Image (cartoon, rainbow, N blue to C red):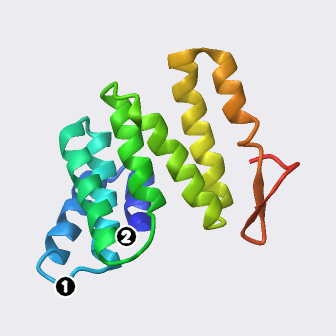
Amino acid sequence: MLTYVGVLGALGDERFWTMPAEVLALLEPLPPGPELVEALFVVAGSEAGQGRTSAALAFAERGLDLTQRLGLGGSVDAVRVRGLTRLMVGDPGGVADLLQAIALATEAGQGSEVCLLHQNLAVTLHSERGPEAALDMHVPGSLSLSHGALTAGSTC
């Protein structure tokens, strides 16, 4: 679903904003599973993108709770969305969420996600703590993928 919603957004299709909630409404009556978890995270991101931070945080928390109940392990997406949303409302705990998402993505070998998260964190730290703090985040962010694992010495 995330890819489909991303394509809608790239095309400028208005369904970009409504499709996540429609998919969630279809999945909610069914037994919970990974698809519902993904839908919750996509809706959380959509809500955050529309400035509805309270709803975004609620969907992210719901997704994290379901992830734990289903034993799906840590979710990079949920922690990232929650962290970015918390930062949008001025909650400094969002930095800890982004650091947790970086750790989860690193553990899962998601190198491109690690790079993106470092860049998100660097932008946030630049505005909150100045350019030196941001530079510290870009250095670890200069890692890349090599057969799905992180390797040093390359750039994102």
* Residue drawn at 25 percent across, 46 percent down: 56
Q: Which residue is mark 1?
A: 31
Which amino acid type is marked by label 1?
Pro
Mark 2 lies on a secondary structure that is: loop
Mark 1 lies on a secondary structure that is: loop
Q: Quadrant of the N terminus?
A: bottom left
Q: Is residue 39 above or below residue 93?
A: below
Pointers 2 and 1 in contact (C-beta within 8 Å):
no
Q: Which residue is mark 2?
A: 1
Q: Where residue 29 sits in the image (x, y, percent)?
A: 11, 79
Camera-near label (2 vs 1) is 1
For marks 2 and 1, give the CA distance: 18 Å
Q: Where residue 128 sits in the image (x, y, percent)?
A: 50, 18
Which amino acid type is marked by label 2?
Met
Q: Where residue 153 sits in the image (x, y, percent)?
A: 88, 48
Q: Is residue 142 above or below residue 2?
A: above
Which residue lies most toward the bottom here?
A: 31
Judge by depth and name the residue closer to the eye, 66 or 89: 66
Q: Quadrant of residue 64?
A: bottom left
Judge by depth and name the residue closer to the eye, 8 or 62: 62
Judge by depth and name the residue closer to the eye, 13 or 152: 152
* Residue drawn at 44 percent across, 71 percent down: 73
* Residue drawn at 32 percent across, 78 percent down: 70
- Local packing at callout 1 (Cα closer than 10 Å; few below 14, some 14-19, many 20+) is few
Inspect this view and state whether residue 15 appears: no
Q: Where residue 93 sits in the image (x, y, percent)?
A: 40, 34
- Local packing at callout 2 (Cα closer than 10 Å; few below 14, some 14-19, many 20+) is few
* Residue drawn at 72 percent across, 69 percent down: 148
Of labels 2 and 1, earlier in sequence is 2
Taking 30 as reference, is 129 left or right?
right
Give the total of numbered labels. 2
